Amino acid sequence: QVQLEQSGAEVKNPGSSVKVSCRASGGTFSDYVVTWVRQAPGQGLEWMGGIVPVFRSPIYAQKFRGRVTITADAFRSTVYMEVSSLTSEDTAVYYCARCYSRSSGHGDGMDVWGQGTTVTVSS
Amino acid sequence: QSVLTQPPSVSAAPGQKVTISCSGSSSNIGSSHVSWYQYVPGTAPKLLIYDNNKRPSGIPDRFSGSKSGTSATLGITGLQTGDEADYYCGTWDTSLNAGVFGGGTKLTVL
């Protein structure tokens, strides 16, 4: 059964960047949609964007275009998500998640999730 | 303001049934599959329903999903205290070309 392991918590200064990794183990990953979702304190889940690692063509929510970069290394079964120009509003728990089947599209159900990475933006 | 509209909260007694609605439009629910997630802050979301009404393995049949037009509904029967959580609907929006979630519904089992 595939598992997703995310990198550890980060504390960043406003204006800086953060890069979070999501590594798969124990199963296939590279030809599935992998999505990034975040949850800010007191807020709901927010869809940020996604990628199919073997195709390396990310898509992004309009809100994050130009400030978020999603990349993938299929050989290493790892997907990365970088957020630049951080503000306090980016303080959140960031999750990666894999869609439930190879034929799934972006926005379809995600059944395997990483443990979450807490990013705190504070001066 | 979320693209998909859910009630902020619902409540019911143990053993009872509850439904959670998710309202959207022709560009999202009306044209895409709906998924439902159970979320306890600090833990990873859990997929309860995908493709409108299918349950992943390991999800009990107390959880059900349905879709009609531009709305979807999650049903939970035989409520347990362990069901207390936030519930989110999600789908794809063809106008936004992005995934979208509802604002979430907090379930309280009284």
Image (cartoon, coloured by chain):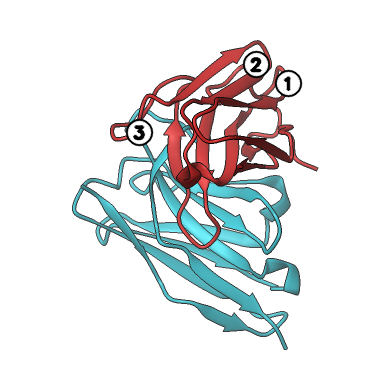
Chain colours: A cyan, B red
Q: Nearer the viewer, residue B31 or A113?
A: A113
The subunit letter for the residue under badge 1 reads B
Q: Which mark is residue B30?
A: 2
Q: Which residue is mark 1?
A: B25
Under mark 2, the amino acid is Gly
Instruction: Return the residue at label 3.
Output: B59
- In the rendered image, is residue A36 in sight? yes
Badge 3 amino acid: Ile
- Kindly indicate whether the residue at mark 1 contacts the one at mark 2 (C-beta within 8 angstroms): yes
Apparent side of residue A89 relative to residue A35 in the rendered image (left or right): right
Look at the picture and state if B51 lies above or below A25: above
Q: Identify the disc placed on residue A49.
A: none
Kind of residue indicated by mark 1: Ser
- Sooner in the amino-acid sequence: mark 2 or mark 3: 2
Outermost residue, bottom side: A123
Please name whichever residue, A75 or B98, is drawn nearer the observer in this view of the structure.
B98
Subunit bearing disc 3: B
Residue B89: x, y in percent? Answer: 59, 34
**Mark 1 Cα-neighbour bin, 10 Å: few <14, some 14–19, many ≥20:** some
Marks 1 and 3: in contact by CB < 8 Å?
Answer: no
Q: Secondary structure at mark 2?
A: loop
The numbered mark, 2 or 1, whose residue comes first in the sequence reads: 1
Q: Circle 3: is it few (<14), some (14-19), or many (20+) Cα within 10 Å?
A: some
Task: Say which residue appears at 61% left-offset and 60% top-offset.
Answer: A68
Question: Which residue is situated farthest in the top direction here?
Answer: B69
